[in-house]
């Protein structure tokens, strides 16, 4: 637990959420608007997704699909999710009882944690971790245990973890491992060897794995995404989660899903019915269209983003940042010590004023502050002109 836990309880707060304030994404996007800065903080694209899904949503809106969809999601969306899982990853799910559509991956994560974590149960997650994980565990009354992903000591390369630290984090109270690959914010794509190590621990200690794969199509160079559910012994103990937001550039639509074995999905559906019940009647058919687009769409998405990654990386390095090359996602992590600061929070709060750019202080994704204090995250899912403009502005930091 971080020192944030010491904060006093306020009347308007859920008692489980005392250590959490406003999410960093809301805070930094508000700062970007207030200061008219270029927002490379919160991860959302600044262009629309494929025209086919926009047309499909419009048809649904005009076609009378404006009432509650079925609790588990429309049959057609669940079929499209099953087809997509089979086509890209060879995973087989029965759309009838092994898939549930959710209000974004966020609801799939929250409903999974509320379904499987009992008060006092421990959940292992890799830090830096996406902010809703810690809150979801807290809402379920669980306790988080973190295993640190570290950048290389010097030079460029992927973040890695020590498998002994993972083994030591497991106790008799551990219920599940929360995994995210490709990983926000580090840009790491877990390798088969690493996933095998995690799977081995899960099988040995009889743990479930909740695997957040929202960036499944955003991977670069020769990195391949491997759903942990495909590894031996894992299908029956894994909940595989994804969403349309990143794959189809529609983060505001909030259509996500969870796939797993029937009893697990039944448990998630039973929680979900009291969270949102359902959402997105006009977006569900549109996402089904997206999931059935040809391979060319998915290939172009990744190669286009790879170009943006290279553009921002080159710019950041030119300005003087030590930046780690991400293998996936649309985020770059930079070490600001080369810019004369080791306090990412102060650095990001001052950045709009100094350079007219917003970034995210990675320390908010860590329990172990020392591991992330000097790291900041920039999003590159933006038009090339905007990335260039941001780099031009950041040049002021080079002095
Ligand atoms: N998981 C990760 C790792 C994310 O970065 C995000 C942010 N979009 C989410 C989950 C939430 O996804 P959604 O917007 O579909 O709820
Ligand atoms: N997933 C996005 C990010 O990490 C934003 C999510 C949010 O705003 N809650 O930046």
Image (cartoon, rainbow, N blue to C red):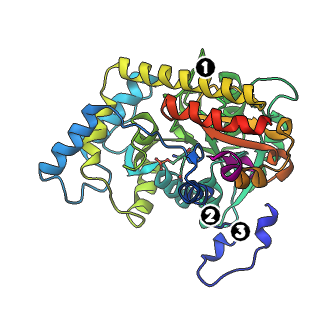
Q: What stretch is highlighted in magenta?
A: 351-366
Q: Residue 147 carries which label?
A: none
Q: Mark 3 points at which residue?
A: 19
Sequence order check, earlier mark of 1 and 2: 2
Q: Distance between the residues labelled 1 and 2?
A: 36 Å
Residue 356 magenta-drawn? yes
Element class at badge 3: loop
With 240 as the anchor, is 176 left or right in this view? right
Residue drawn 12% across and 53% down? 64
Q: Say few, some or many: other residues with alpha carbon within 10 Å of mark 3 (under 14 / 14 to 19 / 20 or more).
A: some
Q: Quadrant of residue 297?
A: top left
Residue occupying image coordinates x 63% and y 54%: 131
Separation (CA) of disc 2 from disc 3: 20 Å
CB contact under 8 Å: marks 1 and 2: no
CA gap, disc 3 to disc 1? 36 Å
Residue plotted at (71% across, 34% down): 395
Q: Is residue 134 left or right of residue 275?
A: right
Q: Nearer the viewer, mark 2 or mark 3?
A: 3
Query: Which residue reaches farthest top?
Result: 222
> Horizontal and vertical percent for residue 162?
82, 34
First in residue order: circle 2 vs circle 3: 3
Q: Position of residue 254 (x, y in %)?
A: 40, 50
Say if residue 32 shows up in the picture. Answer: yes
Within the image, what quadrant is residue 228 found in?
A: top right
Q: Position of residue 221 (x, y in %)?
A: 59, 16
Query: In the rendered image, which residue does mark 1 sit on?
Result: 223
Numbered circle sitting on residue 118: 2
Residue 257 locus on image (x, y percent): 42, 45
Asked where in the image residue 393 lies, by quadrant, the reply is top right
Counting residues from the N terminus, which is met first, the one under dot 3 or under dot 1?
3
């Amino acid at each position: 637990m971080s020192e944030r836990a010491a904060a006093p309880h306020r009347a308007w707060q859920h008692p489980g959420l005392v250590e959490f304030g406003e999410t960093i994404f809301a805070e930094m996007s508000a700062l970007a608007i207030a200061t008219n800065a270029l927002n490379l903080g919160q991860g959302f694209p600044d262009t629309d997704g494929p025209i086919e899904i926009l047309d499909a949503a419009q048809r649904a809106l005009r076609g009378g699909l404006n009432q509650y969809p079925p609790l588990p999601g429309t049959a057609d969306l669940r079929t499209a999710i099953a087809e997509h899982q089979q086509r890209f990853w060879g995973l087989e799910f029965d759309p009838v009882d092994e898939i549930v559509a959710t209000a974004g991956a966020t609801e799939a994560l929250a409903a999974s944690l509320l379904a499987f974590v009992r008060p006092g149960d421990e959940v292992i997650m890799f830090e830096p971790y996406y902010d809703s994980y810690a809150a979801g565990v807290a809402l379920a009354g669980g306790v988080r245990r973190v295993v640190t992903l570290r950048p290389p000591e010097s030079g460029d390369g992927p973040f890695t973890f020590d498998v002994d630290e993972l083994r030591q984090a497991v106790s008799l109270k551990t219920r599940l491992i929360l995994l995210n690959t490709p990983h926000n914010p580090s840009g790491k794509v877990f390798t088969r060897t690493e996933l095998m190590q995690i799977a081995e621990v899960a099988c040995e200690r009889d743990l479930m794995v909740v695997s957040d794969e929202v960036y499944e199509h955003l991977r670069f160079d020769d990195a391949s995404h491997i759903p942990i559910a495909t590894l031996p012994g894992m299908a029956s103990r894994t909940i595989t989660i994804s969403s349309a937001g990143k794959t189809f550039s529609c983060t505001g639509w909030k259509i996500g899903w969870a796939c797993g074995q029937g009893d697990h999905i039944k448990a998630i559906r039973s929680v979900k019915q009291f969270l949102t019940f359902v959402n997105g009647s006009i977006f569900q058919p549109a996402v089904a269209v997206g999931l059935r687009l040809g391979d060319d769409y998915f290939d172009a998405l990744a190669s286009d983003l790879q170009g943006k990654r290279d553009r921002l990386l080159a710019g950041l390095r030119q300005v003087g940042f030590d930046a780690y090359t991400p293998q996936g996602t649309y985020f770059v992590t930079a070490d600001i010590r080369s810019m004369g600061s080791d306090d990412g929070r102060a650095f990001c709060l001052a950045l709009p004023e100094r350079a007219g750019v917003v970034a995210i202080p990675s320390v908010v994704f860590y329990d172990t502050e020392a591991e992330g204090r000097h790291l900041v995250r920039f999003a590159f899912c933006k038009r090339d002109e905007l990335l260039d403009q941001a780099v031009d502005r950041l040049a002021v930091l080079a002095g």
